[in-house]
Image (spheres, rainbow, N blue to C red):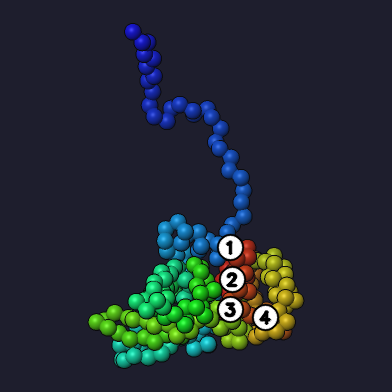
């Protein structure tokens, strides 16, 4: 007969004397990395959208949102520019042997799908990898209250908004120590960006030790792009970055 050892106790009693596990410190993800991990984990963006920092530049470039396009298409077919981050694509072959694709995308207002025929697909395939940010020229129609999009052309988003950036930024800081980090980003951006639109940068310091808000104008223009805006927002001590 086998011996049976009975262990009695309530769940959680064992191991009370064990030390708490030590977790190694790790740097916070940058906003773009955080969004990418959210999408990878749950299939959608939770804390924001990768195009958030692009919206002002896109608007100045004549790019509209999905919500705006739907409203316009209710009045009849139209051609418009639409932004999107690529989520995926499915390629097919027609009866005549021509390739076409259904491309899934999203902007800050929702998800959508665009159809691409062979000529556009061949010219654009390099820009259609998952995670790519693009601007599309589309023919939009409403069929039975459902939006149908036929893509005419595609271009990388950074190129599409390059000349529309530069209106300027206002950076809100919670303490004066953050100024050095901001200055480093702006200095490196100025050295790395010889051409392209530039704009004014101003600070608003909200340090509790001050009697009120302190506004500072740097008195010169710096490169202003969605990437630089995102880099500033990720710095410790920066509360908010808004377009001027």
* Cα–Cα gap, marks 2 and 1: 9 Å
Question: How many angstroms separate mark 3 from mark 2 (CA)?
Answer: 13 Å
From the viewer's perspective, is the residue at label 1 or at label 3 nearer? 3
Badge 1 crowding class, 10 Å Cα cut-off, few under 14, some 14 to 19, many 20 or more, is some
Disc 4 versus disc 3: nearer the observer: 3
Residue 221, horizontal then vertical, whole percent: 69, 84
Residue 230's disc number: 2
Residue 103, located in which quarter of the rendered image?
Answer: bottom left
**Does the CB distance between marks 2 and 1 fall below 8 Å?**
yes
Q: Earlier in the sequence, mark 4 or mark 2?
A: 4
Q: To which residue does mark 4 refer?
A: 223
Judge from the rendering whether residue 81 lies leftward or rightward of residue 71; answer left or right: right
Name the residue carrying label 3. 158
Estimate the x, y position of residue 197 in percent, counting from the top left: 65, 85
Q: For the residue labelled by badge 3, is the local secondary structure a helix, a strand or a loop?
A: helix
Task: Find the distance from the CA under tag 1 to the CA under tag 3.
Answer: 19 Å
Residue at 42% in and 64% down: 44
């Amino acid at each position: 007969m086998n011996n049976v050892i009975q262990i009695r106790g309530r769940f959680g009693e064992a191991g009370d004397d064990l030390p708490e596990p030590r977790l190694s410190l790790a740097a916070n993800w940058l906003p773009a990395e955080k969004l990418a991990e959210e999408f990878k984990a749950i299939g959608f963006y939770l804390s924001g959208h990768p195009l958030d920092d692009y919206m002002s530049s896109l608007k100045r470039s004549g790019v509209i949102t999905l919500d705006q396009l739907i409203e316009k298409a209710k009045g009849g077919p139209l051609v418009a520019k639409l932004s999107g981050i690529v989520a995926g694509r499915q390629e097919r072959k027609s009866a005549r042997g021509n390739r076409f694709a259904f491309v899934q995308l999203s902007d800050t207002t929702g998800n959508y799908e665009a159809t691409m025929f062979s000529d556009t697909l061949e010219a654009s395939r390099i820009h259609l990898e998952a995670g790519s940010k693009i601007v599309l020229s589309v023919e939009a129609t409403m069929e039975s209250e459902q939006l149908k999009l036929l893509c005419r052309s595609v271009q990388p988003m950074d190129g599409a908004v390059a000349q529309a950036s530069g209106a300027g930024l206002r950076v809100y800081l919670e303490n004066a120590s953050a100024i050095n980090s901001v200055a480093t980003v702006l200095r490196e951006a100025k050295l790395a960006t010889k051409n392209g639109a530039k704009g004014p940068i101003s600070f608003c310091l909200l340090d509790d030790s001050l009697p009120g808000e302190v506004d500072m104008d740097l008195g010169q223009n710096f490169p202003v792009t969605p990437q630089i805006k995102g880099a500033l927002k990720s710095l410790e001590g920066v509360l908010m970055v808004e377009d001027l």
